[in-house]
Amino acid sequence: MFKLPLFWLQLIRQRARLMVTLAGIAFIAILMFVQLGFQKALYSSATQVHQNLQGDLFLLSTQYKSLTSNQSFPRSRLYQALGIRGVAAVKPLYAQFAKLKNPSTGQKYSIYMMGFDPGKPVFRLDQINQSVSQIQLPNVVVFDRNARPEFGDIAQQFQQGRAQELEVFAYNATQGYRVKVGGLFQLGPSFGVDGNLVGSSSTFLRIFEKMGRQADMIDIGIILLNSDAHPEQTAAALRQILPSDVQVFTRQEFIAFEKNYWSRRTPIGFTLNLMLAMGFVIGVVIVYQILYNNVSNHLTAYATLKAIGYTNSYLVGVVFQQAVLLAVLGYIPGLFISHQLYDLAREITHLPILMTLDLKLLILLFMIVICIVSGLFAVNKLRLADPADVF
């Protein structure tokens, strides 16, 4: 005959308290989901350009800090790389912040502008590559359909077949430069970028020429290797021959460098890391209080069990079984509510806040660890369960 386990009987004995307990644990799960979700969105959005660039190695200025605060370097450095064995081709990319005037309101907002030679596509994005014939035309750009809404309904108007003429301003410029929208692509904003524009290098340079921007100063050098070339070995060879004003990254190093900048050198990265640590500590404290009170309320019962021969290890096992069960039961509503919060946050911020399987499993593991750590502290109370107390 099936018998209900002791840890479950104790939990359901006071169902109202159990519901309150699960609500508290669900809150912890939601807190962890929100913190990790925004942290992943931070790294994912900050490296969207990196992920979508064609290339095996990347050349950047030694003054480069991040994509949002990049520094230019001589284009000749990129062509020097052609002399290294294994290098198949090189492509320059220009990138700089500009201001885009909302066609409806006239307000100007910061937008990230990138320019490249249409004869040498640099992006993996099909939508940009399919618009190369448009970008080749003078003063034609493609607009990021996922840009924040403050830029206006540019994408919607273009999709309806209405010609869109935009005014782009170099920073500190009083006169804008008029460009036409020749297509749309999908990249999206990040914590440092509200939207993106892509055009030819000639269009880019015309927009920024009054700032003294020169064609021989580029922002990112893209290096393509032969199929038999080893990226790490080729990168090491490039570091030996190139001057000290540039640095060479593999794709993974380029992405890791950007993540490291946002994680360690920006307030938002520090804040998210701190909140994640605090969420873990708060979770341990809350679950500890729950388990401690449960042990205290059943202390006489535990003493009775000891008196009739049950060992300390059995009673400790009961507490840990309760901890794991509470973690799982509290996780389920937390997951459901977090799904709704993710959808809402993604709609409002346009950030890639996604509920992935690895994130779900990670939070579940976090919740189990939190409850087990709390249980380690709570079982100390069992030492007070003296069999003599029942007599």
Image: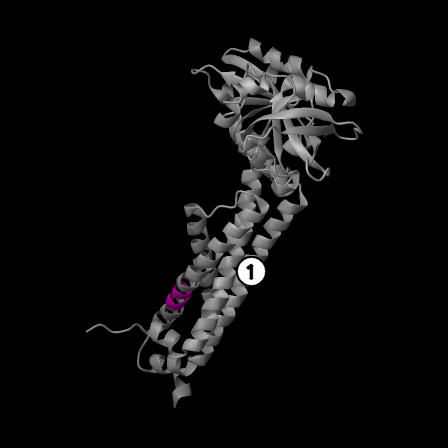
Q: Position of residue 5 (x, y in %)?
A: 30, 72
Placement of the N terminus among the 4 image quadrants: bottom left
Residue 293 located left or right of residue 277? left
Q: Is residue 262 above or below residue 272?
A: above
Magenta part mainly helix, strand or loop? helix
Camera-side residue of 94 and 325:
94
**211 shown above or below 361:** above
Residue furthest top in the image: 83
Q: Quadrant of the C terminus?
A: bottom left
The amino acid at mark 1 is Val
Hey, which residue is sitting farthest bottom in the picture? 391
Whether residue 190 appears in magenta in the rendering, the answer is no
Q: Residues within 10 Å of mark 1 (few under 14, many from 20)?
A: few
Residue 228: quarter of image: top left
324 displayed left or right of 172: left
Q: Which residues are magenta?
A: 321-326
Q: Residue at x 68, y 35 (%)?
A: 103
Residue furthest left as drawn:
1
Residue 322 lies in the magenta stretch: yes
User: Is residue 225 visible from the viewing direction of this image?
Assistant: yes
Query: Which residue in the protein does label 1 denote?
Result: 281
Q: Residue at x 58, y 42 (%)?
A: 42
Above or below residue 188? Residue 243 is above
> Which one is nearer the viewer's eye here, 173 or 42?
173
In percent of width and height, residue 343 lies at 50, 50
Residue 249 vs residue 173, the one in the foreground = 173
- Looking at the picture, how far across and down is residue 79, in whole percent? 61, 11
| Residue 54 in view | no
Figure label count: 1
x, y (%) of residue 316? 39, 69
